[in-house]
Amino acid sequence: MQLTRPQAENLARDGMAALRNGNAARAYEMLSLLRDGAPGMPAPWFLIAQAAQSLGRDDEAETALVHFLAAEPRHLAALLTMAALKVRRGDERAAQSFYRTALNVATLPNATIAPVLVPMLKAGEAFLADCAKRFAAHLGDALAGTGLAAGVSGGRTRYALDLLLGRRELYLQQPSMFYFPGLAQRAFFERDEFAWVAAIEAATADMRAELESVVAAEKGFAPYVQSTPDRPAPANPLLDDPSWSAFQLWRGGERVEPNASSCPHTMAALEQAPIPIIAGRSPMAIFSLLKPGTHIRPHHGMLNTRLICHLPLIAPEGCALRVGAETRAWRAGEMLIFDDSFEHEAWNRGTETRIVLLFEVWRPELTADERAALTDIFEAIDTYQGVAIDTG
């Protein structure tokens, strides 16, 4: 015989009181009478699950939780209860799934977490961390004989595994001004991928001699990020700070004199690179100076259609560049080539000034037609709104 609504409410109230008082058997007896519900009142599946769990009746607790979560799939307490039940029953894979879902629910903007659930959430975090360690150990053992550890499969495979195991964060191109689709998501490119690099690196000694003359003259360098009276000041802590300075050789597609004429070997070396020719915008080339103790904060470049090249001319210890998840140190005479549309930052934690020759080149994947089209696009953009300025 179906219960009336008042009968069901009385049973539910008495069952909850018994549960709170630690009388799980009495609670289970009363709450089980409500499995079929009552007019306007669904079955109290979560309470039934709690009572059954207290009595060690895990099969019935799980069945009740399945019913409850079918109606409320993001109920935090029920998810945590099911996760703990799966742990007890040795179903690690299911437990991980329920704990992950629970932790995701707990981080939602409007989530309200009762104090009683906090230790359950912490238990879930600890369980998942332990599972991750076991998974990493399993993969290490399984792949030990494949040659991966020795680098046979290459850096991309190891990077993929690091992402899988949470050892690295995923970074993607996020240019601040213009995004071109379909280009490889690569933070760094290697020197030996470009035939023109060797010729520029061969001129390192001559370029360093020119740089030393420039530095000795104590003029020509200016802060990389500068304020202008007709624009809002960039929100950069290195604004107008000579700790990060540039000696302009090419700027906005024009030679900068007398700087360019004072560095003929450098200007000749730059002719070897596939530098974009875009009116008002490119070529651009500078000596970039970073004084000791200076940190260029994480930021994104404007475009993903170019690569930034650094040829280190003065590269002391304690200096490095992070692009995405990878950090590399500068080494004198060895080109660093990277996509600055990835989040990147640089620092000088040493005791001497670092100076690199910095310039941009086309992305190698772009066809001649695409480069021509992009040149037209950028010139049209700049004609309307002026050339965008990199503010770091």
Image: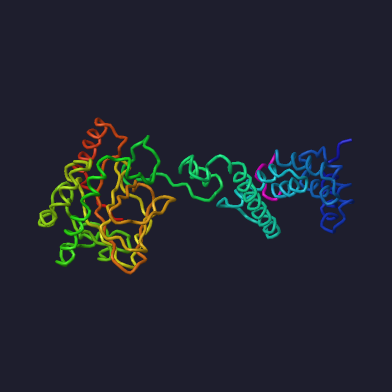
Q: Residue visible at 29% across and 34% down? A: 366
Q: Identify the residue at the far bottom of this view.
A: 351
Residue 260 rendering spot, x and y as whole percentages:
13, 54
Quadrant of the image for the C terminus? bottom left
Q: Quadrant of residue 376?
A: top left
Q: Identify the residue at the far top of this view.
A: 369
* Lateral position of residue 296 relative to residue 44, left or right: left
Q: Residue visible at 56% across and 47% down? A: 165
Q: Is residue 89 magenta?
A: no
Residue 104 rendering spot, x and y as whole percentages:
60, 48
Q: Residue visible at 22% across and 59% down? A: 246
* Lateral position of residue 216 relative to residue 189, left or right: left
Residues in magenta, as a range: 71-77
Question: So how many labels did they put on this image?
Answer: 0
Q: Quadrant of residue 42?
A: top right
* Lateral position of residue 254 relative to residue 192, left or right: left
Q: Residue visible at 77% across and 48% down? A: 88
**Colouring rule applied to residues:** rainbow
The front one of 160 and 234 is 160
Quadrant of the image for the N terminus? top right
The front one of 221 and 179 is 221
Residue 251 rendering spot, x and y as whole percentages:
18, 51
The front one of 203 and 82 is 203
Residue 292 rendering spot, x and y as whole percentages:
32, 67
Q: Is residue 76 magenta?
A: yes
